[in-house]
Amino acid sequence: AQSVTQLGSHVSVSEGALVLLRCNYSSSVPPYLFWYVQYPNQGLQLLLKYTSAATLVKGINGFEAEFKKSETSFHLTKPSAHMSDAAEYFCAVSESGTYKYIFGTGTRLKVLA
Amino acid sequence: DGGITQSPKYLFRKEGQNVTLSCEQNLNHDAMYWYRQDPGQGLRLIYYSQIVNDFQKGDIAEGYSVSREKKESFPLTVTSAQKNPTAFYLCASSGSGQRAETQYFGPGTRLLVL
């Protein structure tokens, strides 16, 4: 069965510092992977997705993620954090043979002034 | 603008009462989904529908029911059998339901128990 692990339920960074949010997946087939962002009391918005094309995926708001098969990882990064990046971030994998997503438990990002 | 609407934004349920959450999309998507979100648990799938008049149970369907009579609409009923309904409920849709398809989410409904 496919699964997603997000290490660190809370991450704090200073404004202007590197953002690194970790996601590891388990899948017996080539995965499709997604990162979503959620602001308080709102729905989820897609940041980026990996669908077996380029391993480095660029998304919105300056975020990018690199698919590393050998490490079964899909970590999300941004070179310089902005106050507006404070939100909760979810990694998801698309389950083989169905339309279902499996979501990680989320990482809440706090940006310090 | 195309998108997904959910109503109401907040919903209060009395003990023993059934309540229905609305989800409408004008994206012409075939597939629709309902998720429940609890703090620290991420999103869990309640029900999903790949096509009109067809739907499947997700991982936590007990105490919930759905219908899919129209392509645009996928209402969720929280029945009195759901003993812990307090949560944030999110509706989503995707185009044809392929694995690579992006799921688009509505703004959510927060259900509270009186």
Image (cartoon, coloured by chain):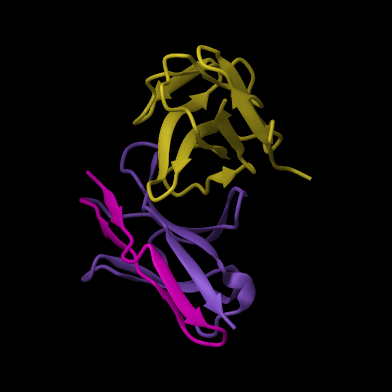
Q: Residue at x 35, y 69 (%)?
A: A22
Q: Residue at x 64, y 43 (%)?
A: B107
Quarter that holds the C terminus of chain A:
bottom right
Q: Is residue A22 magenta?
A: yes
Quarter that holds the N terminus of chain A:
top left
Chain in yellow colour: B
Quadrant in the picture for residue B71: top right
Relative to A58, residue B31 above or below: above
Residue A71 percent location from the top left of the image: 22, 70
Residue A73 percent location from the top left of the image: 29, 67
Q: Is residue A29 left or right of residue B31?
A: left
Viewer can see residue B71? yes
Residue A60 percent location from the top left of the image: 60, 68
Q: Is residue A67 magenta?
A: no
Chain in purple colour: A
Q: Nearer the viewer, residue A97 or A37?
A: A37
Residue B105 percent location from the top left of the image: 59, 44
Q: Residue at x 57, y 18 (%)?
A: B14
Relative to B54, residue B45 above or below: below
Q: Which residues are magenta?
A: A1-28
* The furthest residue to the bottom: A16
